[in-house]
Amino acid sequence: MKLLKDRILNDGKSLAGGILKVDNFINHQMDPVLMKSIAVEFVRRFADLPINKIITIEASGIAPAIMLGYLLELPVVFVKKAKPKTMGDMYVSEVHSFTKNRTYDICVSKEFLSADDKVLFIDDFLANGNAAFGMLDLIQQSGAALLGMGFIIEKSFQEGGKRLRELSDIRIESLARIKSLEVDKVSFEED
Ligand code: 5GP
């Protein structure tokens, strides 16, 4: 997606350790106009799938997911990174965070994810795939069907994309695929 790639080149910052900082338009300050274009592109790529629900993880997945849910007129569920005291029965899985170097539980209420659901997972980044695999585990526990996974940015020099694509039957779409990140230099995969 050219608009997104141009924005990454203009406003993204490539940090040591393979981290791309995009807190000017995705992770801290958000650009809703770009986010709308991102959601429109996700609609284009997933329009043929019979999805009934969008699912994401707090916090940075929520903005693209809600834009997409708005366009498709579908409910959006965000999986939580801390177990709320008020949540009843829930599904729980463990995720290791690459950026924060810590392991945490993710959880979703059984009220909002069930065997009747056909879901599309949306997130900001695909790096090692740990968040995506934690999400896959939650979805499998619930008996729901995962039809697709959409990421704003994939860092294809990390293993997540390869690991997920080996699962074959799940459609995976990333709007900007980064081949390499050097300090102050971002290179994209060819589309
Ligand atoms: P994964 O579980 O695929 O290794 O990483 C996914 C999560 O880590 C994303 O949802 C995102 O929050 C965070 N993340 C991974 N790599 C980066 C990065 O280069 N920049 C930013 N801003 N977040 C990242």
Image (cartoon, helix red, strand yellow):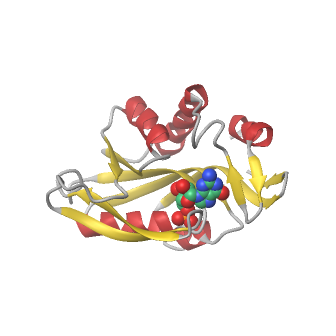
Q: Residue furthest top?
A: 33
Residue appearing at x 39%, y 63% in the figure: 135
Drawn side of residue 62 relative to residue 36, left or right: left
Indicate the position of residue 114 as horizontal and vertical percent values: 21, 57
Q: Which percent across, then down, holds residue 92?
A: 29, 67
Q: Nearer the viewer, residue 4 or 89?
A: 89
Which residue ends up furthest to the left in the rendered image?
A: 88
Q: Is residue 9 above or below residue 36?
A: below
The answer, for residue 172, to whether it is visible in the render is no
Q: Quadrant of the N terminus?
A: top right
Q: How many marks?
A: 0
Quadrant of the displayed image that contains ligand 1: bottom right
Residue drawn where x is 59% and y is 40% of the image: 26
Does residue 38 lie above or below 146 as drawn?
Answer: above
Residue 9, percent from left and from top: 79, 42
Q: Horizontally, is 125 left or right of 62 in the view?
A: right
